[in-house]
Image (spheres, coloured by chain):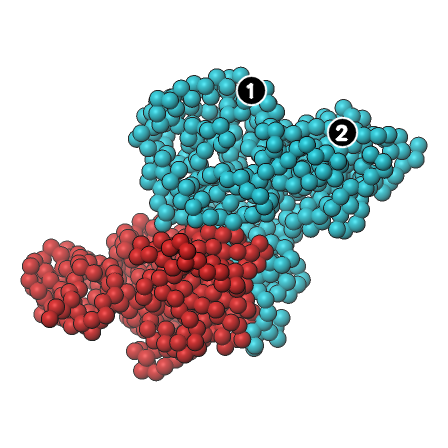
Chain colours: A red, B cyan
């Protein structure tokens, strides 16, 4: 099988990439999806809040996904469903499914759009027994919204990630009781609007600086033990509390899914857990692009779709040999209170073609006005005022075309957050 | 002579690795054998959670059962695992010395090993160990190299032995708990269970953590089992740190916290050792995990907590004599002219996994010595074919497998690359996997870095379909551990 652009993953990033590639006249665009349906995680996200930026409408996950699916099929994008990619190398993909067996696919360019996975219990090393009734929030969401079954009746949710908070509300609608949401950090880790609409509006208590220190029950969860933690996240003795429940949901972070990237020899960023990409979303391996949650975990699907579009368009240009490889790339450096910046590298020539969007996360929240400063070679390129910064809310910044010559002459471009004293 | 046809020749209580290998050893002969297990699967007690190491045999004190059956068992492993098609690797192991005192301990161990009959032991320099194991601490002064040390998947060995025994005519009853003995005077004539009473001539006690309770039914109360908990930590395969096994120098009560490779390619560390009261206390503690990580870092300092994918605890059935208890009791008159009695295998803690095949062989010989007639079956087949493992096959083999059964082309567990074909086969195997955990241990589904996040909803549906039950009846590890509790308001109709 041959195609110009092969997209691995049919979620929002992959669909947007496939559409953009097809719109750039790639001859054959193929989406390879391991699930039986396209849309990635969106079909199980039956709540609203999607598409405000892209469509100017407030849509549910399935509706948002459907719009992209309709457009993709209208353009003639092909999809292989229920198909798992086993191996990739530049220009080549090995996959398997029940209908065709082992498939060898040659592709002019590849877009990695595998999304992310949830951190499981083991990664937190939560002590206690190993009974039924411990699920990640996303698995519970699939059970409830796709399979139509309830994983429990009395829940404790560890972590105030967005999926966890949305599930707290969803489970309440289904007649279950959510006893409490525990968050190890002193602040909410998901979006503030989810905290208000999913927890506060339903009187679900949130305890910050708390974690689960024990899981009890032999066959089924019978209780979890919570405890307050010190600033280093160590449980404080004497603060333990037994919370009877039958299910513990974990919403403790998402990790970009990069087993295939690693195998293809793509350079990964320790801070994001995803590939290092340039402003065209090309990875360190020419011809392999990456977009969406596989690169870094986004807050909003609209941003994922934007990234997918860019990666898909770049992949088509690569496959059709319409663009030169950059002579040199400038690195973006995460300065004071910045955890990471995407893209990690920038072709200065990109700035001659247009402004470039930088996306980043801060390390710690500052609930006061701050200045975001971009500098190169000791010179300030840009200053932007923000009312606050929070790790749960991604910060976007546009580097205008006028910065071209300064970026071109620099070794690296730094971004930092400064508190606005006085 | 009157025959009691309903009676089993031998009932084995407990389908752990010792019980299942004993069943398999007996399945060679024309005997009626019943294997009883209270759990929903074989190997869910001491067998399921240990270091998975096939010890060379330099550690136990010379003259003990532990020493004798360790070395004997180790010698049996290559053939056993070849016959049963079980992952086993004899890659050798090292005991690492971190001080001059440890260096003297290595010499003691080498001498002990020589007396136990362990061959190939050699003391090598720290640099020599680091050539094989670059992650070993620079503080290591030397190591005792034991070429016959190995690793095995203890659970798959147990399943394979049970399957082979069942294929050769042994009866296995899962979810059947032995509750006591039927006696005729002093003599045991049957085993009472929650599914009725099964008459028998011989009872073999392989009850692991509960072996002393079974002994008490027979009026034997001098021996006690203390569960000794050990906690373990598993690392992501992408962060594999060792190619062999690295032991610290042993203390009088334990071989210490070690760093080992598993047959699946993960690095495993542990165990600590803590005597506890409750024989079903499998809980992991925060202190225990910290102790294990700290202990293992003495050998491999670069182990990182963030690469941990799973933690678990195991219970060692530690016997009050400090050695394996191996004895045959033949009480009272024979039943209908046939001999009978009670065989104990108790306190089978480390090196119990290594010794298990030799212990099984000992049971066969002991029964024969006490009058059980052993007639070999002509149809006995010691081979158990390996179930296909998609991720381990070449592309050509994968293609051929999918052509035969397309379900082998559908990946259900993305991290471990387990196919629907493998899951369905395990559900319908001679020892059927009827729970999520049973499937997990056989196929590795849900054991990778996402720990079942992706496959759980899919596996619930496959189990429900193949067992012909509602998803609400699918369990993690038997009744009471249902994975989902009810339908949603609108989704319930489909159930």
Image disc number at residue B329: 2
Instruction: Say whether disc 1 or disc 2 marks the residue closer to the N-terminus.
Output: 1
Q: State whether residue A82 appears in this view.
A: no
Task: Estimate how packed mark 2 is, as few (under 14), some (14 to 19) or many (20 or more) residues with alpha carbons within 10 Å.
Answer: some
Residue topped by disc 1: B62
**Looking at the rendering, which quadrant does residue A362 occupy?**
bottom left
Is the N terminus of chain A in the top left, top right, bottom left or bottom right quadrant? bottom left
- Image-based side of A413 in relation to A309, left or right: left
Q: Chain for mark 1? A: B
Q: Where is residue A238 in the image (x, y as percent from the top left)?
A: 41, 56
Looking at the rendered structure, the secondary structure element under dot 1 is loop
Q: Position of residue B25 (x, y in %)?
A: 69, 33
Q: Chain for mark 2? A: B
- Image-based side of A309 in relation to A380, left or right: right
**Looking at the rendering, which quadrant does residue A407 occupy?**
bottom left
Is the C terminus of chain A in the top left, top right, bottom left or bottom right quadrant? bottom left
User: B451 or B458, which is in the foreground?
Assistant: B451
User: B237 or B303, which is in the foreground?
Assistant: B303
Disc tally is 2
Alpha-carbon span between mark 1 and mark 2? 26 Å
Taking the spot 66% from the left edge, 38% from the top edge, the residue there is B211
Relative height, residue B310 to residue A205 (above, below): above
């Amino acid at each position: 099988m041959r195609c110009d652009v092969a997209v691995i993953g049919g979620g929002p990033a992959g669909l947007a990439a496939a559409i953009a590639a097809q719109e750039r006249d790639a001859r054959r665009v193929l989406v390879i999806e391991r699930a039986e349906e396209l849309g990635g995680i969106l079909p199980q996200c039956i709540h609203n809040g999607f598409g405000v930026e892209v469509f100017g409408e407030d849509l549910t996950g399935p509706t948002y996904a459907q719009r992209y699916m309709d457009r993709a099929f209208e353009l003639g994008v092909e999809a292989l469903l229920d198909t798992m990619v086993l191996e990739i190398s530049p220009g080549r993909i090995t996959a398997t499914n029940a209908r065709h067996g082992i498939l060898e696919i040659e592709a002019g360019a590849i877009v990695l759009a595998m999304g992310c996975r949830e951190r499981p219990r083991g990664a937190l090393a939560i002590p206690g027994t190993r009974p039924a009734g411990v699920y990640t929030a996303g698995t519970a969401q699939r059970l409830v919204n796709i399979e139509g079954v309830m994983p429990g009746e009395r829940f404790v949710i560890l972590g105030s990630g967005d999926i966890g908070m949305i599930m707290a509300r969803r489970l309440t609608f289904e007649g279950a009781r959510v006893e409490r949401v525990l968050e190890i950090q002193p602040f909410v880790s998901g979006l503030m609007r989810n905290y208000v609409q999913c927890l506060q509006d339903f009187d679900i208590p949130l305890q910050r600086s708390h974690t689960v220190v024990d899981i009890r029950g032999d066959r089924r969860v019978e209780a979890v033990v919570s405890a307050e933690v010190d600033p280093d996240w160590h449980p404080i003795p004497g603060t333990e509390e037994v919370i009877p429940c039958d299910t513990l949901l974990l919403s403790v972070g998402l990790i970009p899914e990069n087993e295939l990237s690693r195998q293809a020899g793509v350079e990964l960023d320790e801070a994001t857990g995803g590939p290092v990409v340039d402003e065209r979303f090309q990875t360190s391996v020419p011809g392999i692009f990456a977009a969406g949650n596989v690169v870094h975990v986004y807050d909003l699907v609209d941003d994922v779709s934007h990234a997918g579009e860019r990666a898909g368009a770049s992949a088509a240009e690569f496959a059709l040999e319409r663009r030169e490889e950059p002579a040199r790339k400038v690195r973006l450096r995460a300065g004071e209170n910045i955890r990471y910046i995407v893209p990690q590298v920038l072709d200065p020539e990109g700035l001659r073609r247009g402004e470039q969007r930088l996306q980043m996360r801060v390390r710690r929240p500052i609930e006061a006005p701050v200045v975001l400063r971009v500098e190169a070679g000791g010179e300030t390129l840009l200053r932007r005022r923000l009312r606050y910064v929070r790790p749960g809310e991604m910060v976007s910044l546009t580097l205008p075309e006028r910065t071209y010559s300064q970026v071109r002459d620099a070794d690296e471009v730094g971004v930092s957050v400064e508190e606005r004293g006085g | 002579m009157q025959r009691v046809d309903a009676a089993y020749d031998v009932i084995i209580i407990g389908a752990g690795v010792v019980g299942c290998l004993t069943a398999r050893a007996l399945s060679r002969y024309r005997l009626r054998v019943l294997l009883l297990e209270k759990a929903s699967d074989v190997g869910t007690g001491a067998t399921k959670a240990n270091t998975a190491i096939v010890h060379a045999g330099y550690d136990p004190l010379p003259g003990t059962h532990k020493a004798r059956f360790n070395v004997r068992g180790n010698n049996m492993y290559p053939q056993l695992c070849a016959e049963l098609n079980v992952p086993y690797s004899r890659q050798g192991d090292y005991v690492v010395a971190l001080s001059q005192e440890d260096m003297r301990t290595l010499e003691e161990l080498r001498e002990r090993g020589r007396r136990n009959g362990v061959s190939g032991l050699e003391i090598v320099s720290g640099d020599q160990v680091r050539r094989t194991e670059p992650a070993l601490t620079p503080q290591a002064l030397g190591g005792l190299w034991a070429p016959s040390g190995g690793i095995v998947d203890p659970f798959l060995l147990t399943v394979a032995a049970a399957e082979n025994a069942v294929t050769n005519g042994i009866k296995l009853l899962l979810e059947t708990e032995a509750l006591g003995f039927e006696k005729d005077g002093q003599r045991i004539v049957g085993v009472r269970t929650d599914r009725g009473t099964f008459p028998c001539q011989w009872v073999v006690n392989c009850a692991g953590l509960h072996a002393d309770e079974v002994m008490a039914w027979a009026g034997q109360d001098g021996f006690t089992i203390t569960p000794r908990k050990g906690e373990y930590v598993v690392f992501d395969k992408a962060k594999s740190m060792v190619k062999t096994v690295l032991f610290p120098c042993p203390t009088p009560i334990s071989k210490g916290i070690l760093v080992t490779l598993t047959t699946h390619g993960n690095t495993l560390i542990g165990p600590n050792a803590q005597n506890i009261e409750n024989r079903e206390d499998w809980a992991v503690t925060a202190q225990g995990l910290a102790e294990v990580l700290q202990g293992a870092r003495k050998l491999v300092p670069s182990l990182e907590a963030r690469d941990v994918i799973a933690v678990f605890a195991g219970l060692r059935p530690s016997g009050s004599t400090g050695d394996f208890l191996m004895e045959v009791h033949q009480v009272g008159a024979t039943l209908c002219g046939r001999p009978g009695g009670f065989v104990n295998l108790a306190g089978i803690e480390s090196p119990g996994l290594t010794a298990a095949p030799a212990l099984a062989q000992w049971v066969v010989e002991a029964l024969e010595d006490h009058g059980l007639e052993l007639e070999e079956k002509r149809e006995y087949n010691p081979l158990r074919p390996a179930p296909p493992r998609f991720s381990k096959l070449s592309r050509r083999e994968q293609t051929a497998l999918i052509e035969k059964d397309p379900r082998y082309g559908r990946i259900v567990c993305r991290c471990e690359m387990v196919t629907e074909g493998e899951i369905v086969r395990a559900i319908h195997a001679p020892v059927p996997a009827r729970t999520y955990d049973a499937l997990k241990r056989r196929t590795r589904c849900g054991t990778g870095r996402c720990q079942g996040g992706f496959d759980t909803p899919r596996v619930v549906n496959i189990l429900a379909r193949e067992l012909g039950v509602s998803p609400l009846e699918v369990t993690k590890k038997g009744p009471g551990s249902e994975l989902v509790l009810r339908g949603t308001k609108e989704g319930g109709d489909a159930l």
